[in-house]
Amino acid sequence: MKRILMIGTGGTIASEMTPDGLSPELTPAQLLRAVPSISSLCEVDCLSLFSIDSTNITPAHYLRIAGAICEHYGHYDGFVISHGTDTMAYTAAALSYLIRGAKKPIILTGAQKPIGFDSTDSKINLSDAFTCACSEKIHGVNIVFSGRVITGTRARKTCSKSFAAFSSINYPDIGTLQDGRLLCYIESEYAPTPLFSAALDANVGLIKMIPGTDVELMDFLLSRKDAVIMECFGVGGLPSYSDDALFEVVRRHTEAGKYIVVTTQVQNEGSDLSVYSVGHRLKENRGVLEAYDMTSEAALAKIMWILAETRDPDEVAARFYTPVGPDMLHRG
């Protein structure tokens, strides 16, 4: 039988009702006892790293999860991480860069309803996650949720309450599950030996453009951060208004060594700065990187990973535009 390590981090799946609302209380072992059929799939060891609402997840937690997988990688055939849904896509993206080219499955799952609720989705999600963790066709970091297998750099939570909470953005699901059976459509690439990273530059921010974006807000954010993800309108571009003040802020901070990653608020199809003049002007700036069809979650995690290893402008750009798995497929 396959040996799987289950890593507990808290989240709704492990929550119980308290006087202050739902709070993560259950250990991974307690979760497993609610799904006894998993014992017929594989041998499972449990590791509880922390037990928190995923709203409280930080980049330091990504590093703890990646470090635990690195430490135990040689002893197990796969990994299942129970995690809260609200920031699961961010964690999946970060782990995809911290652990690259893994042949073994690294599966994140959770639930929209706690495992103790009669209407819970947690039991089927856990069972499906372990099915994928035992598969020879699933590789690297993936989210398994509501019968879908979504690669880690393409996942986004798109429903706040429904069981089908996650979607794969600009990329197909790599598999589906029904009645415990896995149908794998895409077998992800992997390396002979995975590459682990142990650092992230957490000093990265995000700003969402709105009509009439405050120049001072942009200036303040760039003055404090090493990089900023800028979610623009449509295919991307920076408002010029009547004074080009935003372009001047971008020029000044990028010349000082800061980076801006341009993405779009539109969920599907990605950015293309070459279309309009408000975008084309940004392409001439070496400190501006374009996310194209990447998700904001992946763009954020990728620049955190890159800036922890290099600040050389040419190297930063080269790494950003080099796909890690299927994180970036279409450039323009």
Image (cartoon, grey):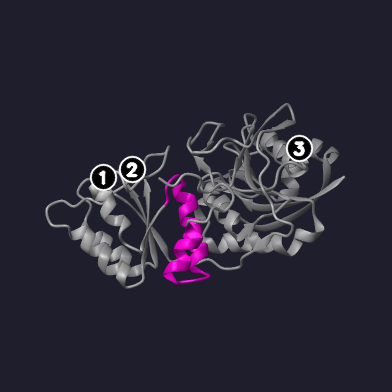
Residue 182 appears in which quarter of the rendering?
A: top right
Quadrant the C terminus occupies: top left
Quadrant the N terminus occupies: top right
Amino acid type, mark 3: Val
Neighbourhood count class around disc 3 (C-alpha, 10 Å): few under 14, some 14–19, many 20 upward:
some
Residue 269 in percent (x, y) is at: 42, 38
The region drawn magenta spans 291-320
Amino acid type, mark 2: Val
Could you tell whether 40 is left or right of 260 in the image? right
The extreme right residue here reads 1
| Image marks 1 and 2: residues in contact by CB distance under 8 Å | yes
Pick the front one: 58 or 213:
213
Q: Which residue is mark 2?
A: 235
Marks 3 and 1, how far apart at CA: 54 Å
Q: Which residue is mark 3?
A: 35
Q: Nearer the viewer, mark 1 or mark 2?
A: 1
Above or below for 94 versus 16: below
| Image marks 3 and 2: residues in contact by CB distance under 8 Å | no
